[in-house]
Amino acid sequence: MARNEDRMRQVVAGLSEGVILIEPDQTISYANEAVLAMHGVAGLSELGETVAEYRRNFMVDYRSHPEVGPLQPPVERLLAGEAFRDTDVEVHNFRDPRRRWVHRIRSLVTMDGSARPTGLALVIQDVSDRYEAEARFEDMFQANPAPALVCRVADLRYVKVNQGFLDLSGYTREQVLGRSFCEIDLLTHVEGRSLAVENLHAGRTIPQMEACLNVPADSEKYVIVAGHPIRMPGGEPCMLFTFADLEDRRKAEVELKLSEERFAKAFQLNPVPTALLSTDSLVASDINEAFATMFGGPGDNSGAVASRLWVDEAEQARFKRTLKRSEGVRGFEARLRTQDGEILDCLVSAEPVRINGGTFVLCAIQDITARKRTETELIAAIETVMADASWFSHGVIEKLALMRNPSPPGKPAALVEKLTRREHDLLEGICKGATDPEIAAELGLSLSTVRNHLASLYRKIGVNRRSAVVVWARERGIGSAPAGGAGKATKLGRKHQTN
């Protein structure tokens, strides 16, 4: 008998599973090395030599079969002679609460001829790694912002769902878990639905495809869905469904379509000649009615129209360089040819745009021929008047001079009335061709005083040489003038300073 017992212990010692032998008097007679390792102890004394000591050293909580309850741990069921299988428990070491294991336990009970227990054994398998992997999967599954749920292949029922899917669909967790694929169809309106359903039944990958979910709010939710085969605890085949919400994309597509329709209408109704040009060669791909009317009829080829549009090739090349460098042009002056061969002075503005997924250059043209002609005629008239300004008041002459040569932006206009008496005397002397010493002798001033007044005059009227002073003065009717006008111009200046 002792020999059989020794042989049995040798067999048990070589098992990868842990084995604990318990005598009917509740003493632990044997524990193999696998059991000691599963409890993190070196010997039977640390494990517990009796059932009572084991209870003091370790706490056991059920991970499966929670209906059994904490008051009926596996060892108590074993002592009662109960046979059970595959019970998962979590084991805590009282001396080091941080150390925990998950054990899968089954019982072995041997009986004598009178049906009395003669030997009790617990067979233990360490499944901690599997539970840790499941815990990591569960944490990742629930934390994943992408909507997902798990369908069991055997009966096509949903066994897991994360918050992302609940937010996407509007379902509650209770409305999803335990429901079947027939009740919540994830492949509605899918192109190739029959193949997708066949892959689901077979546990094969379902490639990405667009689908329409029927959600509780009596509406439809457009998504991209894909299925990935996985195995849940116990090796159970399942299908992991993941989703991407298409609502924002669909709304963006609708808005883009409406925007492009609005652009097309505005493009055609715009009274300003406008064209869409290719980004590389700037060949017109589309023109509006105003452009066709001015530069080419509706039946003309837009590319041909663009090729004969520019009068000066160098000007066209400069426009292209400017557009490429700054990615936008405003008010580029150019001469363009109409369909009748007339040459127009134009302002060309261009800006890159995206339409129907393509990149173009939107080009608008403004005809300024009449405006430039008016400006030219006005300047000619001013120059004619300024040639004999003796019969004009000084104020009118000065306004005409400012119209002809306006001051730079942000710089105040230089006016005769702002000159001092001495500066005005210097202005007249310069216009007569007098030198600085001659002006000093005529005015009875020192040469340095004359030069100081001269520097002040230069600053006020914005010049840096005597010839520019003469031009500035003559534009305002001061100094030399045609016959009969010089004296009056001088008198006007004197009168102005006196007043």
Image (cartoon, rainbow, N blue to C red):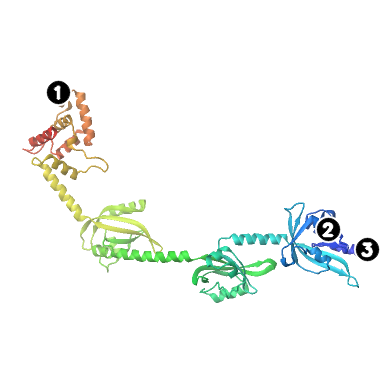
* Residue 405 visible at all: yes
Q: Name the amino acid, label 1.
A: Gly
Residue pointed to by mark 1: 444
Which quarter of the image is occupied by the C terminus? top left
Q: How far is the residue under mark 2 from the one under mark 1?
A: 131 Å
Out of 4 and 337, give the one closest to the viewer.
Answer: 4
* Residue 464 visible at all: no
Q: Reading the chain from its start, which is encountered first: label 2 or label 3?
A: 3
Residue drawn 15% across and 39% down?
476
In the image, residue 335 above or below residue 188:
above
Residue drawn 78% across and 69% down?
84
Q: Which mark is residue 2?
A: 3
Q: Reading the chain from its start, which is encountered first: label 3 or label 1?
A: 3
Asked if marks 2 and 3 touch (Cβ < 8 Å), the reply is: no
Asked if marks 2 and 1 touch (Cβ < 8 Å), the reply is: no
Q: Name the amino acid, label 2.
A: Ala
**Residue 452 picture location, percent across and down:** 22, 27
Mark 3 residue element: helix
**Residue 310 picture location, percent across and down:** 26, 57
Nearer the observer: mark 3 or 1; the answer is 3
Q: Quadrant of residue 450?
A: top left
Which quarter of the image is occupied by the N terminus? bottom right
Q: Name the amino acid, label 3.
A: Ala
Nearer the observer: mark 2 or 1; the answer is 2
**Residue 132 picture location, percent across and down:** 69, 59
Out of 345 and 458, give the one closest to the viewer.
Answer: 458
